[in-house]
Image: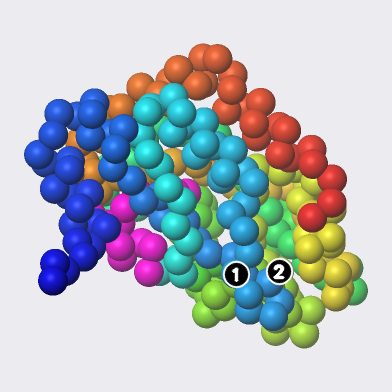
């Protein structure tokens, strides 16, 4: 009896053994994202912003981009091994050794979220002295934040989901949660209060920084060959304004 061929091995064979244009239309290309879970630990659907952006990028590039959710550390390791593209990874010297990065898709601000019972005002870095900030597991942020963490303020990065991070915030174990978002403070606050109604969350008016939303592409074959096609598609989508329209449309959706 024939043994089934693992999906990624099949992808490698297809990409290496066929012309680029035909291959790109046939082979599934995993796009690895950080998984989201609800307060009960159940997986949540792919965030609408990722669905919208990856859908447009797939249509424009003619690549079969398929979103796959994993714990963030695992997703990073998979990308570094050449097992998929990594959505939303910040550039670091370590990642640059094995990953290349696409042109920016859109900008994501980094907002501090606190409980209304103990709101954290952020106007300057000194406001964070001695505070404990929860960041995403394995998360990297802007250079100013990275330079000050563990010096001006402490970080907590052991919580694997937004639900668990907000529980720590509500219990007073951390002073704020740092959240990457394309939304403005009012939009993000409304979304969080709808999705996690056990407390009332407030978002600082000033962000601690922003990072362009990029897709990391393994430098190794076969996925490394896709970078030019991805970048060309992003340029066309930016010129047409389609990506920004998708971002604005999702940002303005009310409710959860």
Q: Quadrant of the C terminus?
A: bottom right
Whether residue 38 is visible to the viewer of this picture, yes or no, is yes
Is disc 1 placed on a helix, strand or loop? loop
Residue identifier under label 1: 43
Question: Residue at position x 52%, y 36% from top?
Answer: 55
Q: What colouring does the structure picture have?
A: rainbow
Image location of residue 245, percent across then percent down: 66, 26
Q: Nearer the viewer, mark 1 or mark 2?
A: 1
Give, as a single range, the part of the protein colored magenta: 74-88
Whether residue 96 is visible to the viewer of this picture, yes or no, is no
Is disc 2 placed on a helix, strand or loop? strand
In depth, the one of 184 and 194 nearer the eye is 194
**Residues at discs 1 and 2 in contact (Cβ within 8 Å):** no
Q: Is residue 45 above or below residue 99?
A: below
Image location of residue 63, percent across then percent down: 35, 34
Residue identifier under label 2: 176
Q: Tell me: 252 left or right of 57.
A: right
Question: Residue at position x 69%, y 80% from top?
Answer: 40
Distance of mark 1 from mark 2, alpha carbons? 24 Å
Furthest residue to the top? Answer: 239
Q: Is residue 59 above or below residue 142?
A: above
């Amino acid at each position: 009896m024939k043994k089934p061929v693992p999906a990624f091995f099949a992808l490698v064979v297809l990409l290496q053994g066929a012309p680029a244009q035909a291959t790109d239309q046939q082979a599934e290309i995993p796009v690895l994202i950080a998984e989201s879970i609800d307060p009960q630990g159940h997986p949540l659907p792919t965030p609408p912003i990722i669905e919208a952006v990856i859908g447009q990028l797939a249509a424009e590039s003619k690549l079969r981009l398929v979103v796959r959710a994993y714990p963030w550390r695992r997703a990073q390791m998979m990308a570094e091994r050449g097992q998929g593209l990594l959505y939303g990874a910040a550039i670091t010297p370590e990642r640059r050794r094995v990953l290349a990065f696409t042109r920016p898709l859109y900008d994501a601000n980094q907002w501090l979220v606190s409980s209304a019972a103990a709101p954290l005002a952020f106007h300057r870095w000194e406001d964070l002295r001695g505070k404990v900030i929860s960041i995403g597991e394995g998360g990297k942020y802007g250079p100013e934040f990275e330079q000050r963490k563990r010096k001006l303020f402490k970080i907590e990065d052991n919580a694997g989901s937004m639900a668990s991070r907000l529980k720590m915030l509500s219990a007073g174990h951390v002073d704020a949660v740092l959240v990457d978002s394309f939304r403005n403070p009012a939009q993000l606050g409304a979304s969080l209060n709808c999705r996690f109604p056990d407390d009332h969350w407030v978002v600082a008016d000033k962000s601690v920084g922003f990072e362009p939303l990029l897709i990391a592409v393994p430098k190794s074959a076969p996925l490394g060959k896709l970078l030019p096609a991805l970048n060309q598609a992003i340029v066309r989508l930016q010129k047409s304004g389609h990506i920004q329209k998708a971002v604005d449309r999702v940002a303005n959706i009310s409710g959860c």
